[in-house]
Image: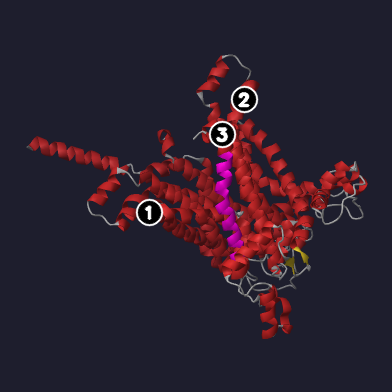
Amino acid sequence: MTTYILRRILLSFPVLIGILFATFALARLIPSDPCRAMLGEKATDAVCDDFLRRHGLDKPIPVQFAVYMGEILKGDFGRSFRFSMPVTEILIQRLPITVELSFAALLVSILVGIPLGVISAVRHNSWVDVLTMLWANIGVSMPVFWLGLMLAYIFALALKGTPLQLPPSGRLSPGLITVPFYEVWNLKVAAGTTTFTMLDFLSRVNILNGLLTNDWKLVKDAIVHLILPALALGTIPMALIARMARSSMLEVLGQDYIRTARAKGLRQRVVVMKHAFRNALLPLVTVIGLSLGGLLGGAVLTETVFNLSGVGRILYEAITARDYGIVQAFTVVIAVFFVILNLIVDISYAYLDPRIRLD
Amino acid sequence: MSQEVQVIQSLDAEGIALQSVSLWNITRRRLFRRKSAIVGIVILGILIFIALTAQWLAPYDPIRSMLDVKGYPVRPEKRQSPCIHAFGCPEERPQHLMGLDGNIRDEFSRVLYGARLSLFIGFATVTFAIFIGTVLGALSGYFGGWLDNIIMRIMDVLLAFPSLLLAIAIVTVLGPGLINALLAIGIVSIPAYARVVRASVLSVREMEYVSATRALGGDTLQILFRRILPNALTPLIVQGTLGIATAILDAAALSFLGLGAQPPTPEWGSMLGAERNQVFTAPHLVFLPGIAIALTVLSFNLLGDGLRDALDPRLAHVS
């Protein structure tokens, strides 16, 4: 198992370097002069020559790439010229919002998708099955931004005044003040250290911060604001998971050892949960891992619709404002996250199925 | 002698009889046995009909404001709700099945013309991706070695990005616009096809009939295109049909963000994006283009699923 994991980790290095090179190339392919884009009218030839030298842009491309790699390894993604602050700082502020949203969406999709799929496999061709598959087909076909807008319309306007009314935008109700848990706990951590960065990052995940500070009002408010975006973002993966759960359960349920288990007189519940489900889990892991990548893409749209200033939203704004520092950094972070995710999927696959690691 | 001729004739007759049950016939029969596939084909048929006849079906010019329409009887209102005579809208008001949009254009005409654009987007990007993907996959699988390694590692890098984000990044480089968005979505979908073709090439490269062609002096191109690539056709058709669905969704998303089709082009995603802040005051302008996107994507998904099952040789006994 260890050999397998090590080999798998080594194999992902070329891809990581490729990603870094792709984002590096992307920023250099953009048809604009960074000096004139940044300095505008003031950019004379002399000023620009100096600018290029100061930013190392006069060096050969391989040298520039090496420097760029070195900076990224140190966690330095350069500065955003629009916010005039380090990109890393912006990442720490915005990433928790996206993480919270993606996690909630994934939770929704797994908690609803798997039971739906399993039930429709066990009750094959029943009305539950037909309805689930109908819903799954429609679910994968809906544009996430449209679903988001429709949910906002239904729950914020059509159901206004009922207990089901939900806020259509933002992360928290206006006026709600959050105190980071490390301040409540009186932790003395100097700003600028890695520990502080980590604590700061965690404290920006509102639900977590609320739980850690025992602030139930905050937790409730954060959850209420998260429901609609999570539903919108989670629907496509939910449909994919339900479909995959159904088809892989159907395949497993048709096998001989299931018949043996039934012949032994085991109860239906035991057969389904203990014998069938564990083996049907395998393809599900892949689908769940892959849909996380889709979640990140969908987060751009969901955050735009629900006015959440997460990574997706800021990435979109950076693109329209041509703030390449942010575009480059965020693309790297998302792609690296995606590669790590695939790695985890592969490893859990090997853990669940001994045939793979022994191959 | 005459007996021999008879035998050959009867064999011939049998051969013809066997030939008439071709793969396509079996596939068609199996496809039409699935209700969901039929639903997909019907929706798609209607969409293609709308796309082809949009200029006759649409009551108004999709990019012209009602203010510029000569002889328009009443003063048109921005974002007017649908006015359907059969549902009690006064006769003296002109009929607008889906209301008017923020620029006082007939939403129904725009939705009809949008079908044309969305189908074009789907077919164009997938054709592009299949073409490039097939060439790359075939080269990779047939020649192997370092070429295979380079091509497939590039594909891995492309696959390492969530597709929509990569498309957004590519559009940033190329600049917003419909053609650039198409190119971006096309590039993003190449790896899927390259992998499919490579796998099929690998599976038959060493087969006897390929070696036989080589021994008979067939050149590389002939072997690749006539002996090997036809094997990749089935998975390519399935992947392509499902790929059109994804391409249409991604293109709509790019246009929604303002990176794809530019106004006043009647594209569903950009129509929805332009009116998204009006969802509480004029929900029909958000609801209807979204339904159009969902229906189009649904039809390709249903057809693709149906084709996959119908073309699957493991399910041959079902027919």
Q: Judge depth for marks 1 and 3 and give the one in front.
A: 1
Tell me the SS state at disc 1.
helix
Tell me the SS state at disc 2.
helix
Asked if one can make out residue A229 in the rendered structure from this viewpoint, the answer is: yes
Q: Judge depth for marks 2 and 1 and give the one in front.
A: 1
Circle 1 chain: B
| Magenta-drawn stretch, dominant element (helix, strand or loop) | helix
Q: Which residues are magenta?
A: A4-25
- Callout 1: 10 Å neighbours few (<14), some, many (20+)? few
Q: Which percent across, then down, holds residue A273? A: 64, 25
Q: Is residue A198 left or right of residue B239?
A: right
Question: What is the total number of numbered labels drawn onto the structure image?
Answer: 3
- Callout 3: 10 Å neighbours few (<14), some, many (20+)? many
Residue at image mark 1: B143
Q: In the displayed image of the protein, which residue is found farthest to the top? A: A264
Q: Label for residue A101?
A: none
Q: Which amino acid type corresponds to the residue marked 1 in the rendered image? A: Phe
In the displayed structure, would residue B140 be above or below residue A358? below
Q: Label for residue A248?
A: 3
Tell me the SS state at disc 3.
helix
- Callout 2: 10 Å neighbours few (<14), some, many (20+)? many
In the displayed structure, would residue A92 be above or below residue A134? below
Label 3 to label 2: alpha-carbon separation = 12 Å
Residue at image mark 2: A272
Residue B128 or residue A334, whichever sits in front? A334
In the displayed structure, would residue A254 be above or below residue B33? above
Label 2 to label 1: alpha-carbon separation = 47 Å
Give the residue drawn at x 56%, y 38%. A3
Circle 2 chain: A
Task: Tell me the quarter of the picture where residue A41 sits.
Answer: bottom right
Q: Which amino acid type corresponds to the residue marked 2 in the rendered image? A: Val
